[in-house]
Amino acid sequence: MTTSTLTVRKRRGAYVLAGHPSALRTGVSMWRGEISTAAGSFEVTSTDRHRLGAVARVAGRPVVQLHPGESRVPGPGGPAHWSPGRCSGVLTRGANRIGVSQAGWPGAPVRVEVTGTWAELDLVVLSACFAVLSRRRRRTFTIMAIVGAIGHH
């Protein structure tokens, strides 16, 4: 089984998958965004208020769904499972695995470890990156709100 490492870097307002013609564009809150790949353009949104996952859609139809309770990805194979962490996430499907992590500082590149074969790899990777980045942004906004509230007393 092959393993490769991919990098996603922020460049000119978009998160770009190095060596691939694919990118993720988000708003400031990272509640929603747009993924562009060679296969087309996909709307991506957080799955819930806790931002545990993401759904990428084309014409309103889910293509990638990442959530601890139910995950779906394109291509053949058994069920997929998404496990989010504080600054990371792991997607598994059988023996195949995609691990996404970002170092502790804002703007750090996102490291993606890919094991096995995945259909629509760019779309799946950028959906997983969005889920991790969105969850991290929510945490940052929460911390800022708490510090702001404490600072006004």
Image (cartoon, grey):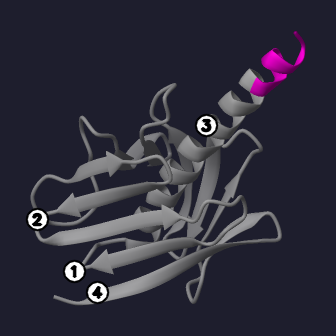
Nearer to us in this view, 41 or 112: 112
- For the residues labelled 3 and 1, the Cα–Cα distance comes to 31 Å
Residue type, mark 3 in image: Arg
Residue type, mark 1 in image: Gly
Instruction: Determine which of the numbered discs, if any, sits on residue 55 in the image.
Output: none
Front: mark 2 or 4: 4
Is residue 53 a member of the stretch shown in magenta? Answer: no
Q: Which residue lies furthest to the right in this view?
A: 152
Nearer to us in this view, 151 or 17: 151
Q: Residues within 10 Å of mark 1 (few under 14, many from 20)?
A: some
The residue pinned by badge 3 equals 139
- For the residues labelled 4 and 1, the Cα–Cα distance comes to 6 Å
Q: Where is residue 7 in the image (x, y as percent from the top left)?
A: 54, 79
- For the residues labelled 2 and 1, the Cα–Cα distance comes to 9 Å
Q: Is mark 1 on a helix, strand or loop?
A: loop
Q: Which of marks 2 and 3 is nearer the N terminus?
A: 2
The residue pinned by badge 1 equals 116
Question: Is mark 2 in CB contact (under 8 Å) with mark 1?
Answer: yes
* Residue range highlighted in magenta: 147-153
Front: mark 4 or 1: 4
Residue at x-position 67% and y-position 28%: 142
Q: What element carries label 3?
A: helix
The residue pinned by badge 2 equals 94
The residue pinned by badge 4 equals 3
